Image (spheres, rainbow, N blue to C red):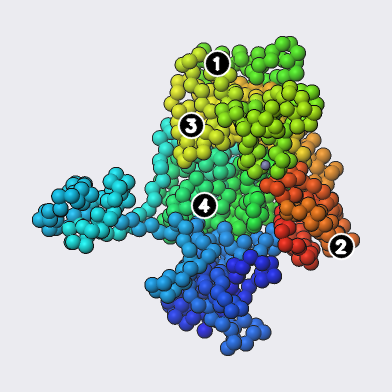
């Protein structure tokens, strides 16, 4: 008899934990006699269980032939049905428990990332079979219906008015066809096909189909293997080899300037990993998971690569995930969640641009991919490689200390670009002085001159604007008031094309005439003198077109122009194919693009991120500026970088100008250490929100008290708040938070989960614990 530990998918913390069930003998028997085979067949399964008079979905986290201790095996209920085959193994089950504890999530929330893409958490009874099944979204394996002519179709003569049937027969006379495709060409075709099939004229058959991913045609996407590796690349590869040989989850941080050949190191290391019979997972920020990045992996490893990101349909994601599970794909390239892909025999984990904030998940389980990857590498005996031109202060600090949580952390520097490509010269332009000298344009004089050069030499330029919309804010020139969303307390953004004000917290928008009243007066002082403040990508695009000759291609890339599937790729191709072009865009253009003809990279306004109320503001600004600067001068022509700012003396901007990262890192580490911020502490954020301001306020006070009480006299802990969040109101919900600092080695997840468990939460108020928070707004 087999017994299973089952985590129930019931969204209440009170029922969190594992429950024991007996395994139906026929289910266990289906895996044969070998106990190891039975255990690995059972662990990771989704099952239907009886639970206090109803049915619940559960996930098997452990299985054993020993009855659970302290329980009467004879009285245990049996689970009723298998809903989905195993999606993860015992090592993953261990990691699930680690995520639950470390990030204060429920067990079911910690299981979800490990399930097959699109697997639903609801069941429905199939009336025909009497069995329960998971409510499927569009995912799961896809069987496609095809139609073809039956052998004696030639004898069949349709009725004169059966035009649909005639159409179908004509189409099928040229060969078999997908039913859906026919239906699209010829509405009503599928019912005609059914009629014809019932007459024996047409045969319908099903075929399993793998959703093919679109291939890129970008010229720069192929990865030619370099003839010689640089010294830095060799050092990195031998550090990785050493970490892999040790098999204890050691970490190698590749701190290499943009274009120093980090991706090339990944490719080499993966090649070696595959040759040894192991698999590799590569995480790339969602935004840089372009055809270009994927293309480089595909051109080296072909069909061994599976790709996972959010722009794929659920069905496509399922297929890619399944390729990994079957062991057909040994390299998975994907966004954050690819970390959980069921590859066989993991030998290498790679996180590119490891400093990116998007590696922190902002819904439960609120894990950080870097931390989970480090734990996963340890548990699988694999190595973890982190790469960045601007590593996080957390990773840099761990490398200085030499170890973290029992693993060794090693930093390898790659300060140079291979071959002749040189780091570009960086020029900082003080916009205040431009303004006082009478230049009121978006483009400073040096930038205009540089653009002229690009046009003259028929090269390419990339312009970053860290904003969206035509002009960011409307500001009252008389009182300085900026109209805010009445639901979210967020400054509204002005969009010129639709002539509306938009809230970027909740997505609401107002025609400009209707806000704040039909005459468009300042909501604060009634002045009519509202003016645009700041600029958006549309305005930069328009002014560029006015400034540049007609034969220069201007491509705009931002959230608006990349909404449609494939739009991102199409825009990059347009830029790639043009002879002379300027790419204008938001952050998404700063990452991962590698076009050798780009000789100018410019930042229109560097100050926006510096002003955020966040202890990482300087680090983030520095990261972004370095990334943009890295877009220039990847080819033979030395690049030029221009940064426009009102704050030229800021250390982050100074560091980009002088290419002196060390000084900035020292300065930043000192500030963090003094204020006891990460990496010298852990910072967790408990956020509370609800429609009733008083309830939220009261619970936030109780919450802070409960945490303080739980901490007691522990040293190195500190509770800040409760306070209103910066985004004090979103979607009509009031938001307050309690910040908690704790020592680096503290088990913050467990302590905060315990503290919060004692609260009596009123209906209508939500609470989330965000361990090692990144979003503090
Ligand atoms: P990163 O990932 O650090 O930005 P890449 O791996 O994309 O850098 O390399 C930048 C460019 O240099 C690419 O075009 C790549 O093909 C080329 N490259 C990388 N390594 C070498 C090398 N050892 N010799 C010559 N060219 C190289
Ligand atoms: Zn005003
Ligand atoms: Zn809003």
**Measuring 41% from the left and 72% from the top, which residue is drawn there?**
127
- Give the CA distance from mark 1 to mark 3: 22 Å
| Circle nearer the N terminus (1, 3) | 1
Few, some or many C-alpha atoms within 10 Å of disc 1 (few <14, some 14-19, many ≥20)? few
Q: Is residue 541 above or below residue 145?
A: above
Q: Which residue is mark 4?
A: 280
- Give the CA distance from mark 2 to mark 3: 55 Å
SS type, badge 1:
helix
Q: Is residue 508 above or below residue 317?
A: above
Q: Which residue is mark 3?
A: 572
- Give the CA distance from mark 3 to mark 4: 28 Å
**Residue 276 pos. (x, y %):** 48, 54
| Circle nearer the N terminus (3, 4) | 4
| Circle nearer the N terminus (2, 3) | 3
Q: Residue furthest front?
A: 518
**Measuring 63% from the left and 45% from the top, which residue is drawn there?**
358
Q: Residue furthest top?
A: 437
SS type, badge 3:
helix
- Give the CA distance from mark 1 to mark 4: 48 Å
The answer to whether marks 3 and 4 mark residues whose Cβ atoms lie closer than 8 Å is no
**Measuring 54% from the left and 64% from the top, which residue is drawn there?**
121
Q: Which residue is mark 2?
A: 709
| Circle nearer the N terminus (2, 4) | 4
Q: Residue 546 got which mark?
A: 1
Residue 764 falls in image quadrant: bottom right
């Amino acid at each position: 008899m087999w017994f299973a530990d089952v985590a129930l998918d019931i969204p209440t913390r009170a029922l969190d934990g594992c429950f024991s069930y007996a395994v139906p003998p026929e289910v266990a028997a289906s895996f044969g006699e070998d106990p190891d085979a039975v255990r690995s067949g059972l662990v990771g399964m989704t099952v239907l269980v009886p639970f206090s008079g109803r049915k619940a979905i559960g996930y098997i986290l452990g299985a054993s032939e020993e009855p659970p201790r302290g329980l009467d095996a004879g009285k245990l209920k049996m689970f009723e049905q298998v809903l989905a085959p195993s999606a993860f193994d015992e090592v993953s089950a261990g990691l699930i428990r680690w995520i639950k504890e470390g990030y204060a999530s429920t067990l079911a929330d910690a299981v979800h990332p490990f399930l097959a893409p699109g697997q639903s958490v609801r069941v429905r009874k199939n009336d025909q079979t009497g069995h329960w099944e998971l409510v499927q979204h569009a995912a799961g394996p896809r069987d496609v219906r095809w139609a073809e002519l039956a052998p004696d179709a030639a004898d069949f003569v349709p009725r004169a008015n059966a035009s649909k049937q005639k159409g179908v027969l004509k189409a099928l006379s040229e060969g078999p066809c997908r039913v859906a495709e026919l239906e699209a060409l010829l509405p009503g075709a599928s019912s005609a096909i059914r009629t014809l099939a019932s007459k024996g004229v047409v045969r319908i058959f099903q075929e399993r189909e793998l959703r093919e991913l679109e291939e890129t045609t970008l010229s720069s996407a192929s990865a030619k293997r370099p003839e010689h590796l640089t010294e830095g690349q060799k050092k990195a590869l031998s550090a990785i080899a050493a970490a892999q040989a040790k098999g204890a989850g050691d970490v190698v941080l590749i701190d290499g300037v943009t274009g120093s050949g980090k991706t090339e190191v990944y490719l080499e290391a993966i090649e070696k990993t595959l040759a040894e019979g192991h698999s590799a997972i590569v995480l790339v920020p969602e935004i840089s998971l372009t055809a270009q990045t994927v293309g480089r992996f595909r051109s080296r490893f072909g069909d061994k690569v599976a790709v996972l990101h959010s722009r794929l349909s659920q069905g496509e994601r399922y297929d890619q995930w399944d390729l990994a599970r079957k062991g057909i794909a040994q390299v998975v390239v994907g966004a954050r969640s690819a970390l959980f892909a069921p590859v066989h025999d993991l030998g290498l984990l790679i996180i590119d641009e490891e400093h990116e904030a998007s590696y922190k998940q902002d819904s439960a389980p609120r894990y950080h991919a870097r931390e989970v990857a480090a734990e996963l590498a340890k548990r699988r005996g694999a190595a973890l490689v982190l790469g960045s031109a601007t590593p996080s202060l957390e990773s840099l600090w761990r490398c200085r200390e030499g170890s973290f949580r029992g693993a060794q952390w090693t930093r390898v520097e790659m300060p140079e670009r291979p071959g002749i490509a040189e780091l570009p010269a960086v020029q900082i332009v003080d916009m205040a002085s431009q303004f006082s000298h009478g230049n009121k344009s978006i483009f400073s004089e040096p930038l205009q001159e540089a653009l002229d050069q690009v046009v003259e030499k028929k090269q390419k330029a990339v312009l970053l604007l860290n904003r969206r919309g035509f002009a960011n804010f409307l500001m009252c020139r008389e009182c300085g008031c900026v109209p805010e969303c009445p639901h979210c307390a967020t400054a509204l953004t002005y969009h010129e094309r639709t002539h509306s004000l938009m809230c970027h917290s909740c997505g609401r928008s107002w025609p400009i005439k209707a806000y704040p009243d039909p005459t468009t007066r300042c909501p604060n002082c009634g002045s009519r003198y509202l003016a645009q403040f700041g600029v958006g990508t549309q305005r930069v695009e328009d002014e560029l077109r006015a400034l540049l000759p007609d034969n220069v291609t201007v491509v705009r890339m931002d959230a608006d122009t990349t909404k449609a599937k494939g739009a991102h790729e199409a825009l990059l191709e347009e830029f790639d194919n043009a002879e002379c072009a300027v790419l204008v865009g938001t952050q998404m253009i700063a990452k991962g693009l590698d076009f050798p003809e780009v000789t100018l990279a410019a930042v229109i306004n560097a100050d926006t991120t510096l002003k955020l109320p966040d202890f990482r503001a300087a680090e983030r600004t520095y990261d972004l500026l370095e990334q943009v600067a890295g877009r220039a001068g990847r080819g033979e022509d030395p690049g030029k970088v221009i940064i426009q700012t009102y704050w030229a003396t800021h250390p982050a901007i100074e560091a980009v100008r002088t290419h002196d990262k060390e000084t900035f890192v020292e300065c930043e580490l000192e500030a963090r250490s003094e204020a006891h911020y990460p990496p010298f502490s852990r910072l967790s954020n408990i956020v509370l929100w609800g429609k009733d301001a008083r309830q939220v306020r009261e619970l936030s006070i109780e919450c802070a008290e409960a945490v303080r009480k739980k901490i007691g006299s522990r040293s190195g802990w500190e509770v800040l708040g409760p306070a209103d969040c910066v985004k004090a109101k979103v979607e009509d919900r009031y938001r307050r938070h309690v910040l908690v600092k704790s020592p680096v080695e503290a088990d913050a997840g467990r302590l905060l989960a315990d503290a919060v468990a004692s609260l009596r939460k009123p209906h209508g108020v939500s609470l989330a614990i965000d361990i090692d928070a990144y979003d503090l707004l």
